[in-house]
Image (cartoon, grey):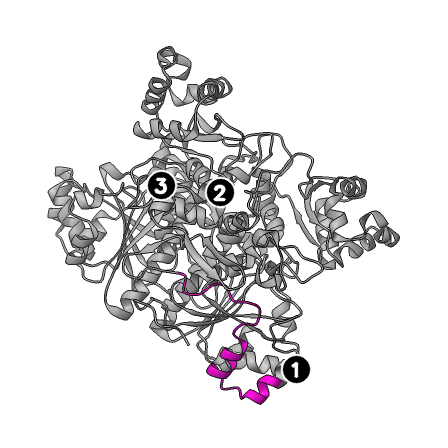
């Protein structure tokens, strides 16, 4: 059984954050109808990587990953016919997810008040760079810009170089997941009260919320955290075939590490008597560790030190992650077979639910793939009418 | 026990008894509490949440004015930042009496959540089938670093190991650097949000069917989702996945450029040829606008070193906020790179009331980051500061479970509950 199979979502969103929110609904069983309009062709179609260079529009990896299990339709939001079809869809829906600029939905007569009139109890979730209100609401952003304004970039990287953003689209993930959680909460509230609401997700706020612990710490200490100076050990140490992250400052970790190296007497070295000494003399500590670590592979250190309850991680590169035995035994990666892109592999279940598991039922839809199905089966229009709208360019 | 709030919060009828700690799990359950759930946090006196910064003389926290005070474990910024709106009790599960009280709490709760390493719950013999016996519709979220099964499942982890184990560290860096962890270990809050998502899905299912369930979340796996793009670049194109700094595969310029002032930077992302033309106009570089090497994205990407130097020459003597104002007026994505203190002064966040003052009896009042979404009709507010160690033990045990006063005293004397190490 699917957990969310009683819900219908209209997904008007584009790029990463909004579609990720709608993907969570789709992957746990909701009927998610993805709507692309000439003005709102999903930006994720440009993000790649492309499974087929000749067919880039339908084979962008991020689009395929973010739109699993959704039905895809097209309509022109700005045409009368398109607008009328959207109203029909809304009248059957629990939630609308959108990522248009603030004010756009209202400008086409689809603001929250209008949606609520069409469908009492509906939830509207808007995901935008800076939120629906405030002096920056119309400003433009990408993940890089969100990351910069959130405070996260400032502490990433090295002190003598420029601040770094995280790889990928992390602020969009934070916002997409926040949008999902906010939407689910609003649906939960609706189930209790019958009343819907407008969920306003600012990507900047989603990114800044994960900086919360640093913000309070900086208020307490009076200083902002900085990027690491090159002299400070990073906790990432080279070994025989790569790097491991290692933290051995605590007791009894310190003792256990020297047992592993078969030099238990070294644990008593007076220069490193306390946790503080080990932190303060990080450079000397690294000099001590490096020749020893160089004798072992990442795997040997990981499987040798972990059972001693030492915090150690292998710095896996992307191919190693894809081939990681643990991840594969837990079946993290799934293969999606798409009519144009063919077989594409990407991360599947974000968590394992015993009774209502994550499921890959269908690959991401091609543009307008489910027009006929949705317009005839869900809304009850005749094939002739649908053909007519198609000819007019409304769908 | 839940106090009256102006509007009924969406999860006001939900109770969670949690052993979440540090960041990931604590973030999940803080957001759950933000939405109105009654969240009861359990700690053991001899093993408090590590984010409390430990007991003297081994302190690792950051404290108001750098002063640990008499009870530093109640003053640590890390714990206090991710446990607002929760109740806090102490309970030693090594004692049968402690375990019985825990099971009594499970009986009257909807959710149990924890993020210990995967061997802890089996060691206490408190696996899901055991808890389900006392509460058949219970939802249990377990979120160890590597999940509950598989070859690594018994290993310990934290953000410092999850980042390298999920591939993120290998992708962070300026180019040829060794793998690098992020400044603040982002995998924790990402896992925290996925954890909360799983709980809300499970609650929806339980509302429909009455059925509870066990959820197994691996923080390594949720973190791999963050690099889905690079995973596919490998599975589709065989790409090795090298760090690219701030550069982008499609956009240039795309980076953090130096500005006037100490360690001052501005983020600029040019998404299209039109935006590039407008940027040239703003920089007063009409020659650059006509330079054919830079006229399309492919050209700008293949001459990116030179391009970035030209942009940096212009930004270097200017103020980051001024640059933002000029570029945003032309619809070009741009913002200053803000430090923690500057984030607290961000005019957009301030205008939207993102920060909220929280008065903690043992630290005084400080601003906290808000909930990362806004519900128009159920605004989430901080209703109470993070609990002091064991603050609500008596209240929860007597009010909720009806434990009599003489038994509370006995539990206190044996160190099963308490508020002082």
**Direction from residue A226 to residue B421 in the image, left or right:** right
Return the residue at label 3. Answer: A15
**Direction from residue A374 to residue B35 in the image, left or right:** right
The location of residue B130, given as percent across then percent down, is 55, 78
Q: Residues within 10 Å of mark 3 (few under 14, many from 20)?
A: many
Q: For numbered disc 2, what is the local secondary structure?
A: helix
Please state, as top left, top right, bottom left or bottom right, where the C terminus of chain A lies in the image. top left
Cα distance, mark 3 to mark 1? 58 Å
Say which of A219 and A53 sits in front: A219
The location of residue B135, given as percent across then percent down, is 47, 80
Q: For numbered disc 3, what is the local secondary structure?
A: loop
Kindly identify which chain the residue marked by label 1 belongs to. B
> Are the residues under badges 3 and 2 in a single subunit?
no
> Are the residues under badges 1 and 2 in a single subunit?
yes
Range of magenta residues: B382-409
Q: Is residue B301 visible?
A: yes
**Direction from residue A305 to residue B237 in the image, left or right:** left
Say which of B257 and A185 sits in front: B257
First in sequence, mark 1 or 2: give its number: 2
Please state, as top left, top right, bottom left or bottom right, where the N terminus of chain A lies in the image. bottom left
Is B124 rendered above or below residue A60? below
Mark 3 touches mark 2? (CB < 8 Å)? no
Cα distance, mark 1 to mark 2? 45 Å
Is A64 rendered above or below residue B20? above
Mark linked to residue B413: 1
Return the residue at label 2. Answer: B341
Q: Is residue A45 magenta?
A: no
Q: Is residue A362 visible?
A: no
**Direction from residue A372 to residue B153 in the image, left or right:** right
Cα distance, mark 3 to mark 2? 31 Å
Quadrant position of residue A62: top left
């Amino acid at each position: 059984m699917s957990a969310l199979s009683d819900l219908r979502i209209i997904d008007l969103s584009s790029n990463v954050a909004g579609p990720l929110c709608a993907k969570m609904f789709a992957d746990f069983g909701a009927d998610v109808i993805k709507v692309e309009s000439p003005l709102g062709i999903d930006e994720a179609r440009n993000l790649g990587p492309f499974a087929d260079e000749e067919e880039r529009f339908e084979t962008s990896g991020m689009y395929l990953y973010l739109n699993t299990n959704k039905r895809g339709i097209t309509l022109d939001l700005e045409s009368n016919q398109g607008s009328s079809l959207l109203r029909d869809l809304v009248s059957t829906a629990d939630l609308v997810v959108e990522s248009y600029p603030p004010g756009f939905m209202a400008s086409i007569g689809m603001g929250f008040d209008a949606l609520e009139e069409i469908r009492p109890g509906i939830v509207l979730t808007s995901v935008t760079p800076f939120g629906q209100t405030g002096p920056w609401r119309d400003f433009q952003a990408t993940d890089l810009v969100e990351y910069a304004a959130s405070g996260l970039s400032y502490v990433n990287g090295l002190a003598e170089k420029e601040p770094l953003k995280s790889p990928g689209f992390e602020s969009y993930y934070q916002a997409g997941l926040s949008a999902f959680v906010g939407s689910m909460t609003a649906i939960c509230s609706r189930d209790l009260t019958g009343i819907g609401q407008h969920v306003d997700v600012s990507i900047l706020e989603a990114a800044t919320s994960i900086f919360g612990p640093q913000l309070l710490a900086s208020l307490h200490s009076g200083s902002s955290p900085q990027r690491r100076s090159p002299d400070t050990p990073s906790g990432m140490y080279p070994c025989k075939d790569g790097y491991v992250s290692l933290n051995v400052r605590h007791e009894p970790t310190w003792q256990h590490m020297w047992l592993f190296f078969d030099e238990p007497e070294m644990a008593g070295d007076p220069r490193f008597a306390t946790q503080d000494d080990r932190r303060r003399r990080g450079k000397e500590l690294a000099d001590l560790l490096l020749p020893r670590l160089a004798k072992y592979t990442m795997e040997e250190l990981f499987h040798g030190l972990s059972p001693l309850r030492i915090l150690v991680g292998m710095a896996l590169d992307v191919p190693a992650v894809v081939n990681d035995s643990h991840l594969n035994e837990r079946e993290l990666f799934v293969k999606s077979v798409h009519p144009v892109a063919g077989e594409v592999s990407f991360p599947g279940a974000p968590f394992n639910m015993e009774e209502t598991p994550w499921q890959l039922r269908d690959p991401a839809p091609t543009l307008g793939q489910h027009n006929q199905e949705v317009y005839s089966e869900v809304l009850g229009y005749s094939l002739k009418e649908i053909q007519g709208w198609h000819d007019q360019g409304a769908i | 026990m839940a106090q009256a709030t102006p509007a009924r919060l969406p999860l006001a009828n939900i109770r969670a008894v949690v052993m979440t700690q540090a960041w990931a799990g604590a973030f999940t359950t803080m957001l759950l509490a933000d939405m109105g759930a009654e969240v009861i946090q359990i700690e053991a006196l001899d093993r408090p949440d590590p984010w409390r910064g430990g007991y003297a003389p081994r302190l690792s926290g950051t404290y108001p004015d750098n002063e640990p005070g008499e009870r530093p474990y109640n003053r640590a910024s890390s714990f206090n930042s991710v446990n607002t709106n929760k109740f806090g009790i102490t309970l030693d599960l090594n004692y049968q009496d402690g375990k019985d009280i825990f099971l009594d709490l499970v009986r009257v709760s909807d959710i149990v959540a924890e993020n210990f390493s995967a061997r802890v719950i089996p060691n206490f013999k408190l696996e899901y089938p055991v808890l389900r016996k006392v509460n058949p519709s219970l939802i249990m979220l377990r979120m160890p670093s590597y999940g509950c099964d598989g070859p690594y499942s018994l290993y310990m982890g934290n953000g410092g190991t999850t980042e390298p184990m999920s591939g993120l560290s290998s992708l962070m860096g300026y180019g040829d650097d060794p793998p690098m962890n992020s400044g603040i270990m982002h995998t924790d809050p990402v896992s925290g949000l996925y954890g909360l998502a799983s709980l809300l899905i499970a609650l929806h299912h339980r509302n429909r069917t009455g059925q509870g369930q066990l959820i197994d979340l691996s923080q390594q796996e949720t973190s791999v989702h963050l690099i889905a793009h690079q995973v596919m670049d490998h599975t589709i194109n065989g790409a090795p996945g090298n760090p690219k700094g701030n550069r982008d595969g499609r956009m240039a310029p795309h980076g953090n450029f130096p500005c006037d002032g100490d360690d001052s930077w501005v983020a600029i992302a040019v998404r299209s040829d039109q935006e590039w033309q407008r940027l040239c106009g703003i920089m007063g570089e009409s020659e650059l606008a006509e330079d054919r090497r830079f006229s399309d994205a492919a050209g700008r990407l293949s001459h990116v070193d030179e391009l970035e130097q030209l942009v940096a020459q212009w930004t270097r003597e200017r103020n980051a906020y001024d640059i933002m104002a000029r570029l945003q007026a032309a619809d070009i994505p741009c913002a200053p790179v803000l430090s923690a203190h500057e984030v607290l002064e961000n005019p957009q966040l301030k205008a939207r009331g993102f920060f909220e003052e929280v008065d903690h009896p043992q630290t005084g009042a400080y601003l906290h980051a808000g909930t990362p979404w806004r519900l128009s009709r159920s605004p989430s507010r901080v209703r109470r500061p993070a609990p002091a160690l064991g603050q609500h033990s008596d209240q929860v045990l007597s009010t909720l479970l009806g434990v009599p006063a003489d038994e509370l005293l006995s539990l206190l004397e044996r160190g099963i509950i308490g508020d002082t190490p």
